Amino acid sequence: MYRNVARIFFVLLVAGGLAACRTAPVYNVENALFTKEAPSVQAAGDMIKAAGASLGWQMADDGPGHIVGRLPIRTHLAVIDITFDTTRYSIMYKDSNNLKYDGTQIHSNYNGWIQNLQNAITARSSVY
């Protein structure tokens, strides 16, 4: 009986460890449309920065139509490039620390962070 319990515990421990280390292809957002057109590039940038800040992203302008976002979480760091105009935007992987990036794959949490940012941008762009 004890041996069976130990085996089950071991299998669950290994499965949990594998689930915690999942990687997936990097999720990029390319040429997504805003819900409504922004009145200016500046307004679009302000809206993107506000959407990111609401999720903990540190957003910094890097020229007209370009923002660099950084998301530090504990020992992890995600860095993205966001390019945009008044009608569309793209979110592209730029760099990371401690997210198991290997050139095509990354920790699956990264993709969730990008999808959450995309959803926040979509929601905010609907109020123009």
Image (cartoon, rainbow, N blue to C red):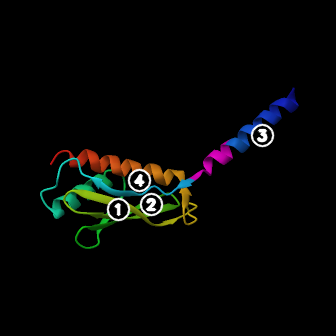
Residue type, numbered disc 3: Phe
Q: Nearer the viewer, mark 1 or mark 4?
A: 4
Which residue does the image show at 72% across and 38% down from the upper left?
12
Tell me the residue that label 1 is attached to: 58
The residue at which mark 2 appears reads as 72
Residue type beneath disc 2: Pro
| Residue 99: % across, % down | 55, 60
Taking 109 as reference, is 1 above or below it?
above
Q: Nearer the viewer, residue 48 or 37?
A: 37
Of the image marks 2 and 4, the number of the one nearer the N terminus: 2
Label 1: how many Cα within 10 Å (few below 14, some 14–19, many 20+) = some
Crowding near pointer 4: few (<14 within 10 Å), some, many (20+)? many
Left/right placement of residue 83 relative to residue 102 reads left
Q: Earlier in the sequence, mark 1 or mark 2?
A: 1
The outermost residue toward the bottom is 63
The residue sitting at 45% across, 55% down in the picture is 27
Dot 1 or dot 4: first in sequence order is: 1
Calculate the distance from the C-alpha at mark 1 to the C-alpha at mark 2.
8 Å
Q: Which amino acid does the dot numbered 1 rest on?
A: Gln
Q: Are marks 1 and 2 in contact (CB under 8 Å)?
A: yes
Q: Secondary structure at mark 3?
A: helix
